[in-house]
Amino acid sequence: MDVEARVLDAIDEAETVRLLADLVRVPSVTGSDAESDLQDGCARMLTEWGLDVDMWKLDLDDLRAREGFPGTEAERAEGYGVVGVTEGEGVPALILQGHADVVPIGDPGKWEGQDPFGARLTATTLHGRGACDMKAGLAANLAVARALHRAGVRLARPLAVHCVVSEEDGGLGAFATLARGHTGEAAVITEPTGGALITATAGALTFRLEVAGRAAHGATRYEGVNAVEAFWPVLRAVRELERERNRDRDALFGANPVPYPIEIGTVRAGDWASTVPDLLVAEGRLGVRLGEDPAEARAALEAALAGLDDPWLRDNPVRVTWPGGQFASGRLPDGHPLAEETAAAVADATGAAPSRTAAPYGSDLRLYAAAGVPTLHYGPGDVRFAHAPREQVDLREVRDVTRALALLALRRCGVR
């Protein structure tokens, strides 16, 4: 039996599903203690499977002071990095990367009585927060490491498995991992791609808008200016800027009508039912175009809101600040062999060549690319289920991705 067949035979599908379920049952919301618990579990598994494991506590103050700090949104008391590296000579020929953190569950009632972290199984699907984004991808990475160990394969060049935190709110974990010196020749991030190869990602910048009003008693509202009403022309300007920024779209986005969305995610105004609100605070995300300097994207929003043709807002301009996660765009260099190598491994594992596309959201890809590590996304799950109360992943995709990544690791790293 050749080495590829031996490693594929060493992938136990039922065992991988159990691994995924165990990962989902850890409620590793970004910044929580459970996020650290899951990292500890990943480190223990990688150690058990023969990898040389580096687990370290992040120096949060040092990271915040570094150039390029990606920002955070969740409160955080601690964080841990985990990197496992197989034996082999030289720098890792391939990195498999996945994030351990998940977003909060939202309204518990929308889960229809199901435990969001219960890892509910049906015939072909696993349901639960993080199942799609991206514990299925994390499970696939871990399953590859386990299969190589079980098959007794010794790689000529190292394979690295990066387990990171804080991807959901900016990428602190990936930033810390790269700052610690864990790099490689190429990386695959197993974010959900629905079987496609994602070779470019747009960016996303978190913004905060403060719109002033003038307080008055609700009974004499005509003496005041309602900040909610003052927000209407701001929202119209945001939508017009979105249309303008999406007129010219990279062909890699295919039929996606809005690859660079601008969305208002939260709106808060007022502090008393019978008082005209004198302040509205809105927070949202601004899409960054491929290859665009994030500073240019910030300037576009600031200019659009500074130029509003509204008497009140001319005298009381909208205040724009940029807290939270700051995702630049990122892209695999054109012609880099990683795309063809991954596509060939996918075709051999599944019988079908994958399509190639770009994603309208920010990810850790841009941090690896900026560090000189050519990177793409390929992983199980449909991103439309990510962050949703119906979050789920098709277990057949988990199987296919695990097998494809095992082939890619063998081919990129070589066998002694």
Image (cartoon, helix red, strand yellow):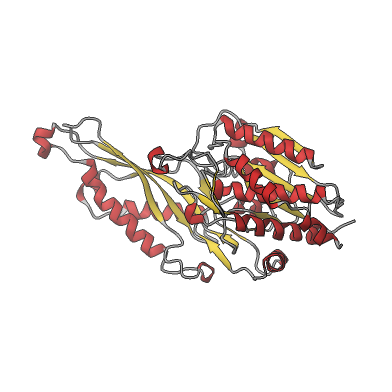
x 49%, y 49%: residue = 391
Quarter of the rendering occupied by the C terminus: bottom right
x 33%, y 52%: residue = 305
x 21%, y 30%: residue = 272
Farthest residue to the front: give it: 123
Farthest residue to the top: give it: 77
Q: Is residue 175 visible?
A: no
In the image: residue 265, left or right of residue 67: left
Residue 354, image quadrant: bottom right
In the image: residue 235, left or right of residue 200: left
- Above or below, 47 against 385 in this view is above
Residue 268, image quadrant: top left
Residue 220, image x, y percentages: 9, 35
x 58%, y 61%: residue = 200
| Nearer to us in this view, 408 or 68 | 408
| Nearer to us in this view, 342 or 319 | 342
| Nearer to us in this view, 281 or 375 | 375
Q: How many numbered circles does the render carry?
A: 0
- Above or below, 116 against 201 in this view is above
In the image: residue 357, left or right of residue 151: left
Residue 71, image x, y percentages: 53, 41
Quarter of the rendering occupied by the N terminus: bottom right
Residue 261, image x, y percentages: 42, 57
Residue 336, image x, y percentages: 70, 66
Q: Is residue 154 visible?
A: yes
